Amino acid sequence: MEIEHTLDQMISKVGNHIDVLTGKWVAQDAGIGAGVDSYFEYLVKGAILLQDKKLMAMFLEYNKAIRNYTRFDDWYLWVQMYKGTVSMPVFQSLEAYWPGLQSLIGDIDNAMRTFLNYYTVWKQFGGLPEFYNIPQGYTVEKREGYPLRPELIESAMYLYRATGDPTLLELGRDAVESIEKISKVECGFATIKDLRDHKLDNRMESFFLAETVKYLYLLFDPTNFIHNNGSTFDAVIAPYGECILGAGGYIFNTEAHPIDPAALHCCQRLKEEQWEVEDLMREFYSLKRSRSKFQKNTVSSGPWEPPARPGTLFSPENHDQARERKPAKQKVPLLSCPSQPFTSKLALLGQVFLDSS
């Protein structure tokens, strides 16, 4: 496809808007902020969640270009994607997720340096303006607002888990005090319309409660189950054995919803099919072994053993015991992952559209 060809050509630097019909870039500014931020975030988190080396390799390729072309004194600017020349010397508040993302790949030193730059902006205004002109050290016209975004606090949470640096708790304290002082109103917390004079807007964004407050809470709650290091977990009976859930390692999506990586093991169709094949091989081996009792000659080499299911050790000696311990089949398993028919997914207001529609 033409789109794929264009992306291959610009694999090291991508713009922030593309026409999906023509494959042409309609915004050729390359950076780490609005329009491309979620893409970079999901490359890393998808690689971790799905154990996908290709996704991580893609991100690391982009990361080289980002460091080579957009980083200046631990700030990240916007550059023209074809030439690499600076197009916007600004910091966007949405870019504050970047130190947290760097911490996920172990780039702690660079993450802390960039975080401290962003933190100086927070201390200057009591929040992060939507756009900050780096050379001038001030807000950008019509981008002076702060809608209580979570990105800098999110990065503080990740980095504190990685380093334990008390400076990150200081940011959390400043955030709580600032939000309480300048944005609290009778019925909630209002968007800061202008950080220069702290004028308020008549609105509160949903991500304030869904993300900002959540990351603040987790920053100050080291014993929260989200931070579990695997010392505790829940064992759940699945159709093909035991599943371990809640052991930690949660991955947050871009809206701060935690995903348990272990749940993928329980709900992965590929694993289910693999287990079915293993069961067939066990039945074949069991039948073969029972027949061998009536034969005088035995096979000198040991029988084939299927790969063990995660958390289970299989051998000819304990095979019968393992099958006896297998829970009885139920019409409705305790944990199941029903697959919705493809045609049912193409629906609008409850009306299913079939192929003939």
Image (cartoon, grey):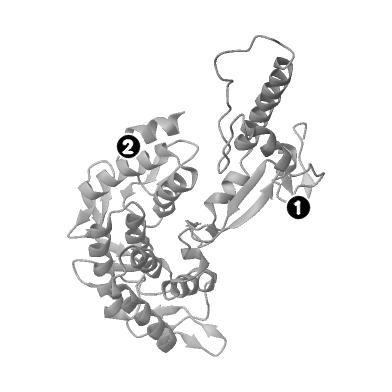
Q: Secondary structure at mark 2?
A: loop
Q: Which residue is mark 2?
A: 10
Q: Secondary structure at mark 1?
A: loop
Instruction: Please tell me whether residue 24 is drawn above or below residue 247 in the rendered image.
Output: above
321 or 265: nearer the viewer: 321
Q: Is residue 13 visible?
A: no
Looking at this view, name the residue that lies furthest to the top: 297
Callout 1: 10 Å neighbours few (<14), some, many (20+)? few
Q: Amino acid at mark 1?
A: Leu
* Residue 157 tag number: none
Q: Is residue 66 left or right of residue 97?
A: left
Q: Which residue is mark 1?
A: 349
Q: Is residue 40 left or right of residue 20?
A: left
Q: Amino acid at mark 2?
A: Met
Residue at left 28%, top 69%? 118
Instruction: Please tell me whether residue 272 is drawn above or below residue 115 in the rendered image.
Output: above
| Lower sequence index among marks 1 and 2 | 2
255 or 261: nearer the viewer: 261
Q: Give the x, y percent position of residue 315.
A: 58, 31
Q: Is residue 98 left or right of residue 224?
A: left
Q: Is residue 257 left or right of residue 53?
A: right
Looking at this view, name the residue that lies furthest to the right: 331
Instruction: Please tell me whether residue 201 is drawn above or below residue 48 in the rendered image.
Output: below
Looking at this view, name the residue that lies furthest to the front: 296
How far separated are the C-alphas under marks 1 and 2? 40 Å
Q: Is residue 118 visible?
A: yes
Which picture quadrant has residue 233?
A: bottom right
